[in-house]
Image: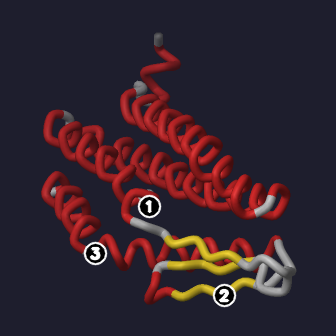
Amino acid sequence: MAVLAVIAVAVGLVLAERLYRVFEVQLSGLILRVITTSGVFVAGERETVYFGLSGDTPLGLRMTPECSSAFMLLPLLLVTAVMLYFRPKNAKRLFVSLAVSATVVIFVNQMRVLAIVGLVNMMGIDEGYYWGHTLLGSMVSVIGGAVALVLFVWLGTRKPRAERGAA
């Protein structure tokens, strides 16, 4: 049953991918409102967060499907389903592992957005966007995805505390 539930979440994430991007852009807007005073507006229907509204160079970042963390979550969900199928006794540990690693993936994607905003503010739109999106953003995503995957495997496959103490 747990395997089917995880697969259903993965299918739901694909089918509701646009709604998930709206969630991500709303979260970005919330974070930006807390850390900046330059004016932020979220256009959820366009999956876009606008920042720098009180300055001379406002900019909008659109959360496109390839920039969303949704498709970084899919492998974690599918691996969880496979591991649940083969090791149903580890369900609790696997769900904790999935929750932790999914949180890391979402956090990393928000850090990528913040890196773009920060570099645009420091370097201007052209250079800041290039460095923030293309280079730093890609590195943050790759490194963050790797950290999430390592955390997932470590948390999902380690022995229970009682067994670790006995060894």
Which circle's residue, 3 or 1, is located before the other in the chain? Answer: 3
Q: Position of residue 160 (x, y in %)?
A: 42, 30
- In the drawing, does residue 82 fall left or right of residue 56? left
- In the drawing, does residue 9 fall left or right of residue 70? left
- Residue 41 is labelled as 2
Amino acid at circle 3: Ala
- In the drawing, does residue 159 fall left or right of residue 139? left
Q: 10 Å neighbourhood of mark 3: few (<14), some, or many (≥20)? A: few
Classify mark 1: helix, strand or loop.
Answer: loop
Which circle's residue, 1 or 2, is located before the other in the chain? Answer: 2
Name which residue lies at 49% across and 33% down. Answer: 146
Amino acid at circle 2: Phe
Distance CA(mark 3)–CA(mark 2) = 23 Å
Q: Which residue is mark 1?
A: 68
Q: Position of residue 85 (x, y in %)?
A: 14, 41
Q: Report which quarter residue 41 is drawn in.
A: bottom right
Classify mark 3: helix, strand or loop.
Answer: loop
Q: Is residue 148 above or below residue 51?
A: above
Amino acid at circle 1: Ser
Most foreground residue, 130 or 30: 130
Q: Which residue is mark 3?
A: 16
Distance CA(mark 1)–CA(mark 2) = 19 Å
Name which residue lies at 67% across and 47% down. Answer: 131
